[in-house]
Amino acid sequence: MSACYEKVLLVDDEQSILLGSRTLLRSAGIMEVLTLDDSRKVMPLIEREEVDVVVLDLFMPYLGGRELLAEISREHPHIPIVVITAADELETAVDCMKAGAFDYLVKPVERTRLISSVKKAIEICRLKNQMSDLKKQFFQKKVEAPETFSSIITVSEKMTSIFQYIEVVARSNEAVLVTGETGVGKELVARAVHKASGLKGNFVPVNVAGLDDTLFSDTLFGHHKGAFTGAEKAREGMIAQAAGGTLFLDEIGDLPEVSQVKLLRLLQEREYYAIGSDVPRKSNARIVAANNRCLRDLVQQGKFRKDLYYRLCTHYVTIPPLRERIEDIPHLLDHFLKKAANALGKEVPLLPSQAIPLLANYAFPGNVRELEAMVHDAVARHKSGTLSLESFKRSMKAGKELNPGAAAELPAAGATAAPAGPLPTLKEAEEILVREALRRAQGNQGIAASLLGITRTALNKRLKKEPALLL
């Protein structure tokens, strides 16, 4: 199982129990385990060092477990406390839980029960810390280490919120699921997660689209010599190359079900089998997965395992498409113009004032990647003076998609171009808004009225005048 970096404190007056419990927890991957056989030293230690979970014996000399439980709960309420006692009494258990205990275990404690309880306490501690960090980041409204995200060109508040979230969850051991349309920059975000995590190992990307189970297993887990025809020597898989780092699995939704089962085991048990081996290998690589379609929809369609989905989306990032952050277009244009000119050995061309309003009215189905391709093609065709927009217009005509959100204000110079196509009348626009609000509210008129910013009575009047809007 993966190493947990949280610190556990074991408190018991019997050295043999401390040694056995410490060994058990370390074998389960919980490496930072402190032990104390004198209850009087607990509070000074907690004041001196950060402790995430306390496992506390209830009956000890000097300072009893109940008194210590109350004191820790009062002075350090964020620390989960697992109480262990030889007394199997309901009243004692209830008193301990009322005093703030996270769990109550009776000696002799089953190995799996102790490990499970401590790991749950660690997870609660981790979630509390993340929530605290998220609140702090939310109110600060800034990114602590902007250099981590320097490869992502953006001024969007939506993207800044994503960066703040990544900074909070990056050091967690749990998986991260990144979703977004093709070309939004999912791998760049995955690399940012790796960079923010502080992991010393490599970032290893693997596109799993189109891999059958055999190829998936060989690519990720490797094989032994002679495991199959042509396996003339042993080969380590990508998971081994990502040891101590991050394994990025792109297009995870395309995995066949049998491969999904193997990936689920890797996430749950942090172990895997190389092809041709019956000896499990441990993995401490952080898993970041990405998909260009909503995995929840695939789960509902029976094409993706529900248990794997919930393992993958412990931390969930959805990258907005370019049409929802058109304020980034001027900055991306500037970046891609310089990049293309440098690659082609040309001077950076001047950009006509009509370029930004023109591009803002395009939906960019290929997102940032499509914009980069457009710019590269335009610079390649460019000869001198101001960059021609003809190359952009040809690409946009081929795409045949307008951006419905293009009315947003742009930080661009020059006149604003009128959106292509006929504008709806005011009455038509009102009908469109009412229909959309009802659709999003799934027919609930109260919710629809809230979305429209009007009273339910006002909405009812409109619907009585135009009953066709309900169809």
Image (tube, helix red, strand yellow):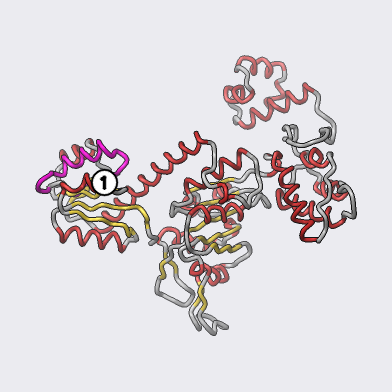
Can you give x and y, in whole percent of width and height, for residue 40 in the image?
A: 15, 46
Q: Is residue 159 left or right of residue 165?
A: right
| Place of residue 208 in the rendered image (x, y in percent of width and height, measured from the top left) | 59, 63
The residues colored magenta run: 60-84
Question: Could you say whether the residue bearing mark 1 is in a helix, strand or loop?
Answer: helix
Mark 1 lies on residue: 46
Q: Quadrant of the C terminus?
A: top right
Identity, as a three-letter code, of the amino acid under mark 1: Ile
Q: In this rendering, would 450 be left or right of 245?
A: right
Residue 68, percent across and down? 18, 42
Residue 366 is one of the magenta-drawn residues: no
Which residue sits at x=75%, y=32%?
407
Q: Nearer the viewer, residue 308 or 179?
A: 179
Q: Position of residue 221 (x, y in %)?
A: 50, 70
**Tag 1: Cα neighbours inside 10 Å, few (<14), some, or many (≥20)?**
some
Q: Residue at x 50, y 47 (%)?
A: 167
How many numbered discs, if any? 1
Residue farthest toward the front in the current orientation of the protein: 347
